[in-house]
């Protein structure tokens, strides 16, 4: 139980390290108060441009991967049963994403976890993680809506849980993360329905005034 709590807390705190905070320090712009008021890479791109979007995405992807690698390092020192290893990896995955989405110093109102889940997927299984990233990019480009690409990332996590980490707990954690993602993107789905959601092409190729 002590190990589980340590992983949960450690991964959560790692998840709380926001790329948007770095962007705010460098630019002086609080992403939670402008654009679509979200502390993620997509809003950083909308408000501050592609360079800041890449910076925020890189930091948030890295922390997702670090949270998982932290657990893998632990496995080198302690020989846990295979089922326990699977559980710890998915607990770290969930805690990192939740830390990003609900950081304590932002009054538990952070980003939407997209970049962080990419880092998690790549660290869990780099081949399947890169395949999930490719699918995310393809769906995003084809539909021109990033939120639809995001959903493929969580579907990929569920598939990885079933295929590579087949326990009830890992599947449950993956499904809970997917539900959180859907709830976090409800407004995006509403804007798509109303024709008001910003298209990826419009954001990436907009001209600066």
Image (spheres, rainbow, N blue to C red):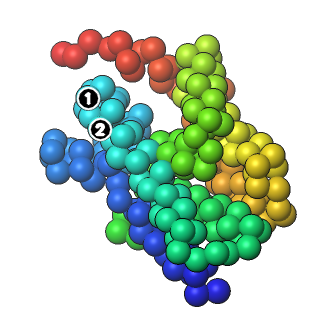
Q: Label 2 belongs to which residue? A: 55
Q: Label 1 belongs to which residue? A: 51
In the rendered view of the protein, which quadrant contains the N terminus? bottom right
Name the residue nearer the viewer: 171 or 29.
171
Q: Could you say whether the residue bearing mark 2 is in a helix, strand or loop?
A: helix
**Image height of 120 relative to 109, above or below:** above
Label at residue 127:
none
Badge 2 crowding class, 10 Å Cα cut-off, few under 14, some 14 to 19, many 20 or more, is some
**Image height of 67 relative to 141, above or below:** below
Q: Using the rendered view, name the quadrant where residue 78 is placed.
A: bottom right
Kindly identify the residue that appears in the image at 38 percent across and 39 percent down: 57
Kindly identify the residue that appears in the image at 55 percent across and 16 percent down: 141
Q: Is residue 22 left or right of residue 109?
A: left
Kindly identify the residue that appears in the image at 62 percent across and 62 percent down: 89
Q: Using the rendered view, name the quadrant where residue 180 is placed.
A: bottom right
Percent coordinates x, y for residue 77 in the rendering: 53, 74
Percent coordinates x, y for residue 116 in the rendering: 49, 48
């Amino acid at each position: 139980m002590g190990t589980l709590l340590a992983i949960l807390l450690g991964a959560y705190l790692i998840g709380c390290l926001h790329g948007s905070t770095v962007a705010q320090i460098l630019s002086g712009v609080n992403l939670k108060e402008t654009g679509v008021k979200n502390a993620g890479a997509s809003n950083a791109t909308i408000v501050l441009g592609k360079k800041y979007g890449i910076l925020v995405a890189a930091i948030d992807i890295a922390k997702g991967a670090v949270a998982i690698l932290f657990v893998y390092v632990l496995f080198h020192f302690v020989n846990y049963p295979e089922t326990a290893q699977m559980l710890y990896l998915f607990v770290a995955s969930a805690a990192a994403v939740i830390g990003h989405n609900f950081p304590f110093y932002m009054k538990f109102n952070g980003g939407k976890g997209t970049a962080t889940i990419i880092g998690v997927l790549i660290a869990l299984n780099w081949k399947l993680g890169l395949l999930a990233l490719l699918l995310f990019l393809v769906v995003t480009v084809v539909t021109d809506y990033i939120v639809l690409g995001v959903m493929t990332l969580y579907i990929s996590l569920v598939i990885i849980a079933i295929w590579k980490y087949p326990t009830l707990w890992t599947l449950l954690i993956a499904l809970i993360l997917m539900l959180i993602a859907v709830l976090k993107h409800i407004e995006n789905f509403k804007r798509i329905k109303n024709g008001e959601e910003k298209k990826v092409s419009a954001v990436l190729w907009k001209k600066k005034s």
